[in-house]
């Protein structure tokens, strides 16, 4: 049994409104993606890290891969996240009983302890799950609105969770679910959404709310503070 990692990094970051893709923005002296690579490469259980980049990416070549402990392979991505992850899955020399860990390149603040706990809880003998994800319970009051942004109702939040990454799945089930979802034209916002659509059991493992996704400019300042706090702890 092996664990493979896929790091989707083919996004162009249009919501960030920056001159370069957000995964290459500087954060505490490194590119955002370098923090994510540093985190994953510190996991000795990983067989390989596959980074999926945009076909027109001109920044990835500037990353010094020799400073990371893990074997890193580069694959060209697709137009959507789902296709990029699928390209990464197809490139793996993985067996049906292997596992795949998918992590957003723009989540540089994920903690090693959370990832190790995810792996420990999901990859256990006779476990009833085909995978698991890190997530945080929703604490805000959630409103459902209509097309005019008028409140229709308040959503019960007791069983609502906000999905994070990494997400960990059995290779065979994940590639089957992703391939079927793409063929059917389903909207896949994360890998768990493909798995749940086809009825595969996926467990939620509570993660840390500091595991933020870099989406807007304000997120960079917050990530900087989080990383400094992690370094000092």
Image: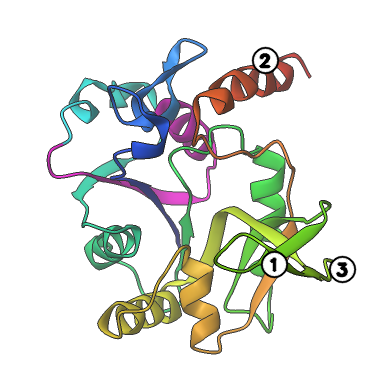
User: Is residue 51 covered in magenta?
Assistant: yes
Q: CA distance from mark 3 to mark 1?
A: 15 Å
Mark 2 or 3, nearer chain start = 3
Mark 3 or 1, nearer chain start = 1
User: Is residue 161 covered in magenta?
Assistant: no
Residue 207 visible in the shown view: yes
The residue at which mark 3 appears reads as: 158
In the picture as drawn, the residue positioned furthest to the bottom comes out as 199
> Can you give x and y, in whole percent of width and height, for residue 144 in the image?
69, 67
Query: Foreground residue, 107 or 6?
Result: 107
Query: Foreground residue, 148 or 193?
Result: 148
Q: CA distance from mark 1 to mark 2?
A: 36 Å
The residue at which mark 1 appears reads as: 144
Mark 1 or 2, nearer chain start = 1
The residue at which mark 2 appears reads as: 228
> Can you give x and y, in whole percent of width and height, for residue 198 in the image?
49, 88
Q: Which residues are magenta?
A: 33-56
In the picture as drawn, the residue positioned furthest to the top comes out as 29
Quadrant where the C terminus is found in the figure: top right
Neighbour tally class for label 3: few under 14, some 14-19, many 20 plus, Cα within 10 Å: few
Residue at 67% x, 17% y: name it: 225
Q: Quadrant of residue 14?
A: top left
Residue at 78% x, 56% y: name it: 138
Q: Indicate the secondary structure of the residue bearing disc 3.
A: loop
Single out the mark in the foreground, 1 or 2: 1
């Amino acid at each position: 049994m092996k664990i493979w990692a896929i790091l989707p990094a083919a996004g162009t970051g249009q919501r960030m409104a920056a001159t370069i893709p957000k995964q290459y923005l500087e954060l505490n002296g490194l590119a955002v993606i370098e923090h994510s690579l540093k985190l994953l490469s510190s996991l000795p259980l990983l067989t390989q890290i596959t980074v999926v980049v945009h076909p027109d990416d001109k920044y990835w070549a500037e990353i010094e891969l020799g400073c990371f402990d893990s074997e890193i392979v580069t694959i060209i991505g697709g137009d959507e996240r789902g296709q990029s992850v699928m390209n990464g899955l197809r490139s793996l020399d993985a067996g049906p009983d292997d596992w795949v860990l998918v992590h957003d390149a723009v989540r540089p603040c994920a903690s090693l302890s959370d990832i190790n706990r995810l792996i420990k809880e999901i990859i256990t003998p006779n476990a009833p799950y085909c995978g698991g994800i890190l997530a945080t319970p929703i604490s805000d009051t959630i409103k459902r609105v209509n097309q005019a942004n008028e409140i229709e109702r308040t959503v019960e939040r007791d069983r609502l969770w906000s999905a994070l990454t990494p997400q960990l799945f059995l290779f065979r089930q994940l590639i089957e679910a992703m391939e079927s979802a793409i063929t059917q034209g389903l909207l896949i916002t994360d890998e768990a959404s493909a798995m749940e659509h086809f009825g595969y059991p996926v467990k939620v493992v509570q993660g840390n709310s500091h595991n933020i996704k870099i989406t807007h400019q304000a997120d960079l300042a917050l990530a900087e503070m989080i990383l400094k706090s992690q370094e000092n702890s």
